[in-house]
Amino acid sequence: MHPEQVTRPEPARLRTSDTEREEIAEIVRAAMAEGRLSLDEGEERLAGAYAAKYRDELDQLTRDLPHGGRQALARMPHRRAATRRSLQRHGSFVMIAAGVLTALWLLSGAHWFWPAIPLFFLVMGLIRHACWGHYELRYTHTAHLRH
């Protein structure tokens, strides 16, 4: 067979899940709350989100929104509260780990404060979470849409 005559199968369209549909519907609601979509257009997109069978159909519903509508979603009150709770849990974990590591250092009798090394990484992770924690949603969403 000649190489030009070989047909390559088209990539299969991936079906969407209820979780993905609900996430897009939440983005559309956030865009409506911001005033980026009219009530009619928003309801039309919501109907499209719930009727979608494939992932590429969902992507088209938010493509014309800034950053795919994810910034508006991150500014919703319940999302901000969830981010705040997550950050508080992370901070509590770092404080407990600092207490345990310091107690171990005191019990070890070491002269050099060795817990400084793991505490440095724990605190840097907390700082990263505080500054860039909102990017997790966008990364997760776009990653599963492209697979």
Image: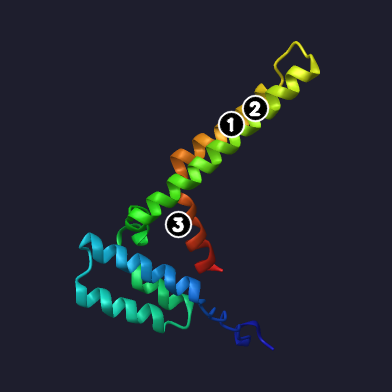
Numbered label tally: 3
For the question of whether residue 71 can be seen, the reply is: no
Colour pattern: rainbow
The answer to whether marks 2 and 1 mark residues whose Cβ atoms lie closer than 8 Å is: yes
Q: Where is mark 1, residue-wise?
A: 95
Quarter of the rendering occupied by the N terminus: bottom right
The mark that comes first in sequence, 3 or 1, is 1
Q: Where is mark 2, residue-wise?
A: 99
Q: Nearer the viewer, residue 15 or 99?
A: 99
Q: Position of residue 47 (x, y in %)?
A: 33, 81
Decide if residue 110 is on the left or right side of residue 38. right
Q: Residues within 10 Å of mark 1 (few under 14, many from 20)?
A: some
Is 143 drawn above or below residue 112 in the view shown?
below
Would you identify the image quadrant in which residue 101 lies? top right
Q: Nearer the viewer, residue 128 or 3?
A: 128
**Residue type at numbered disc 3:** Arg
Q: Position of residue 84 (x, y in %)?
A: 43, 45
Q: CA distance from mark 3 to mark 2?
A: 34 Å
Q: Residue at x 46, y 39 (%)?
A: 130
The mark that comes first in sequence, 3 or 2, is 2
Mark 1 secondary-structure assignment: helix
The answer to whether marks 3 and 1 mark residues whose Cβ atoms lie closer than 8 Å is: no
Q: Position of residue 91 (x, y in %)?
A: 53, 36
Q: Nearer the viewer, mark 3 or mark 2?
A: 2
Quarter of the rendering occupied by the C terminus: bottom right
**Residue type at numbered disc 2:** Gly
Q: Residue at x 55, y 32 (%)?
A: 124
Q: Nearer the viewer, residue 86 or 65?
A: 86
Q: Where is mark 3, residue-wise?
A: 138
Q: CA distance from mark 2 to mark 1?
A: 6 Å
Q: Residues within 10 Å of mark 3 (few under 14, many from 20)?
A: some
